Image (cartoon, rainbow, N blue to C red):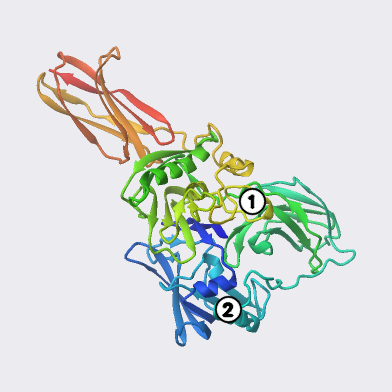
Amino acid sequence: MLVFLLLTLLLPAAARATTLEHMSVEQLARHATLIVEGTVVSTSVEQTAGGDVRTAVRLDVRRALKGAPGAVATFYVPGGALPDGTEVTVAAMPVFTPGDECYAFVDVRGWVIAGFQGKLDVMDGRVAESGERPAAMNRRIEAALRPAGSRPDASGPRPAPAARSPRAPGGPIIASVTPNEASAGTDSTIVISGSGFGAREGLVEFTYGNDDVARIVADDVPSWSDTRIECAVPTGVIKRYAASAGSGPMWVTTAAGAESAPFDFSVPFSYGGEKWTNPRVTYYLNTSGVDDARRESLVDAGTAAWNAVGSGFAFVDGGRTTAGLAKDGKNVISWADGLPAGVIAQSSSTANGGIISEADVRYSNAYGWGDGAPGSGTMDIQSIATHEVGHWLVLDDLYGPGDKAKVMYGFGEAEWVTRVLAPGDIAGIEWIYPQGGGGDDVVGPVCAAKNATVKRGKTVKIYFSVYDEQSAQVSSQVDITTSAGVVVKSWSWDYGENLDVWWTVKYTCRLPKGAYQIVVSGEDLAGNSASEVGRATLTVK
């Protein structure tokens, strides 16, 4: 089984998504080159020659279960804060903090494998993810590393999570939730009605869905009484990585620790809070020269699924490129070597102040790619493209048992095809970019020209400017018109670099003597157009 997760790479403010291979502890153990258990002593951030920002983690080794690192092990995770202020925040990837007690599963390149799954936290004497004592976890890992014929079947029963307070007679009862469906990360508020909640505030928890046991706590609870609770559907952090409420059971736990029976709740989508100012996003494809036509058609079909919604957002096919992941102003989908083990595809976005200006996707060359047809053993390029560019929209992963029909569902597997947007996926893009809304950019570019004088038959430079503060690119047009508005000469340029500079066009003038208007027009990526008429004149002597 594969896990589609959200990786957020901020340059300077955000990385957004990853697709991970779903691994049990036994699978992690067998894939890892190094397995250590101990205490994090320090972290430091660096940038590789290839441009990746990563955090180096130094762990005081209490026990090495695989490999021989010595007293201190050093390994890496994507992300971190550089001295220049560039911050890389990785959701669905583990965050290590000095003092953490944990297990780390590391690949041959030194990366923690399989994202958040590659770190197991030890809290209050138990492994947080499974509820096991460290001694039991050690035995489980050691058993997984024995020769295949002598180890237990990893598909057998999993250890139960740490016990929660049982629902006692007279404990909290959820009678209804209004509304019974609400999005996460949108400040959507619900009202929980029932009895036995207590006068003091306790916990409202929603399913996060990881192995059907993880929960996320609502941290925005405006009111709490014995019969009525008001709270917002949460996004937040679970075990130090980004998470969202999903569709499935929710619970109320009193301040005294008594827990309600689960109550089913639906989350149509989850929004991460960032946005493109100009919601016409041009993307380019680098197929690495492999199976070009099929890769291109499947990626294009993945983006087209979102365009078909008819929201205020559109993906624009920019064709092929030789570029890859780089801070170059291009939104590139490419294939790459060297991603951490267990990472199938990774999406990143460049943002500042909540505004996205660039995004990229990398598929890992470590996996077989195709159309996910039965028996092919391939990952479906189209399904993963649809999912990953959904993260460009800043739609978060959902993991609940009620989210399985959605493109943004957080789990999948080889030959798993999820190409059709579910109602929740559609509701997400329409909420972020409503039809006809054009995003936040409703102002066209500023257009200008300078007066010019030329003798008939001579060449003149015409200076003009088209600039939009909120757009990555603009289109431009310069017209020479008579006083009556008749165009006698015209130049135009498709979407190109947006700079606050004077451009020039050379013109060998054959016009009769007289005065003509220089009309400059432009359009930004949001579709806003503007013109400057009557301010600049071409005088022919």
Q: Give the CA separation, mark 2 to mark 1.
A: 35 Å
Q: Is residue 353 above or below residue 78?
A: above
- Looking at the rendered structure, the kind of residue marked 2 is Gly
Q: Which quarter of the rendering shows the N terminus?
A: bottom right
Is label 2 in contact with label 1 (beta carbons under 8 Å)? no
Q: Is residue 293 left or right of residue 154?
A: left
Q: Is residue 526 above or below residue 231?
A: above
| Residue at x 43%, y 55% (from the top left corner) | 363
Q: Measured from the top left, where is residue 522 in percent x and y?
A: 34, 30
From where the camera sits, is residue 89 visible?
no
Q: Measured from the top left, where is residue 538 in percent x and y?
A: 20, 22
- Looking at the rendered structure, the kind of residue marked 1 is Lys
Q: Secondary structure at mark 2?
A: helix
Q: Measured from the top left, where is residue 350 in percent x and y?
A: 42, 52
How would you rate the neighbour count of disc 2 (Cα within 10 Å): few for under 14, some for 14-19, many for 20 or more?
Answer: few
From where the camera sits, is residue 473 visible?
yes
| Residue at x 28%, y 34% (from the top left corner) | 465
Q: Is residue 105 above or below residue 459?
A: below
Foreground residue, 372 or 248? 372
Q: Which quarter of the rendering shows the C terminus?
A: top left
Task: Give the label on residue 404, or none.
Answer: 1
Q: Measured from the top left, where is residue 74 in percent x and y?
A: 44, 78
Q: Quadrant of residue 243?
A: bottom right
| Residue at x 23%, y 22% (from the top left corner) | 537
| Residue at x 48%, y 74% (from the top left corner) | 106
Q: Is residue 255 above or below residue 220?
A: below
Where is mark 2, residue-wise? 149
Task: Give the label on residue 367, or none.
Answer: none
Which label's residue is closer to the chain start, 2 or 1? 2
Q: Secondary structure at mark 1?
A: loop
Q: Is residue 176 left or right of residue 368?
A: right
